[in-house]
Amino acid sequence: MNFLIIEDEYLTANRIKNIVEEISTKYHVLDIIRSVKQGKEWFKNNQEPDLILSDIELGDGNCFQIFSEYSPQAPIIFLTAYNQ
């Protein structure tokens, strides 16, 4: 199963990657996206993952700016430190 992580905080992104890959050897993180700009480029140039783990707020906007331009068919699990 191929995962895509959208998270702008370096330590958090790497921690999520490590957790995913420790769960099963069948789980593979394709990439870590750190900005809206990078996310749009990634979806334009790559095949869709099986599952997306996405922070909402990124340094240059929010993930919905990516998903409004590229509507992935893969399930998205939103991860955020905010309670709203």
Image (tube, rainbow, N blue to C red):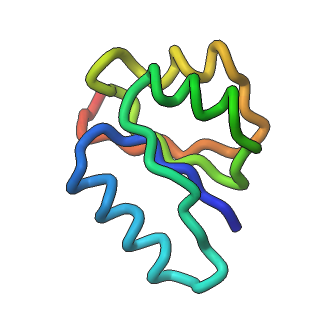
Q: Tell me where residue 3 sits by quadrant.
A: bottom right
Q: Tell me where residue 1 sits by quadrant.
A: bottom right
Between 10 and 19, the one nearer to me in the picture:
10
Residue 82 placement (x, y as % from top left): 25, 34
Please tell me which residue is depicted at 58% across the width and 26% down the height of the picture.
41
Q: Tell me where residue 14 sits by quadrant.
A: bottom left
Please determine whether, in this image, residue 49 is positioned above or below residue 60. Answer: below
Total labels drawn:
0
Q: Quadrant of the C terminus?
A: top left
In this image, 6 relative to 14: left or right? Answer: right
Please determine whether, in this image, residue 4 is positioned above or below residue 82. Answer: below
Residue 57 placement (x, y as % from top left): 33, 26
Between 35 and 51, the one nearer to me in the picture:
35
Please tell me which residue is depicted at 24% across the width and 43% down the height of the picture.
9
Please determine whether, in this image, residue 62 is positioned above or below residue 4. Answer: above
In this image, 10 relative to 19: left or right? Answer: left
Please tell me which residue is depicted at 59% across the width and 69% down the height of the picture.
28
Please determine whether, in this image, residue 55 is positioned above or below residue 16. Answer: above
Residue 81 placement (x, y as % from top left): 24, 41
Please tell me which residue is depicted at 54% across the width and 62% down the height of the picture.
29
In this image, 1 relative to 28: left or right? Answer: right
Residue 77 placement (x, y as % from top left): 54, 46
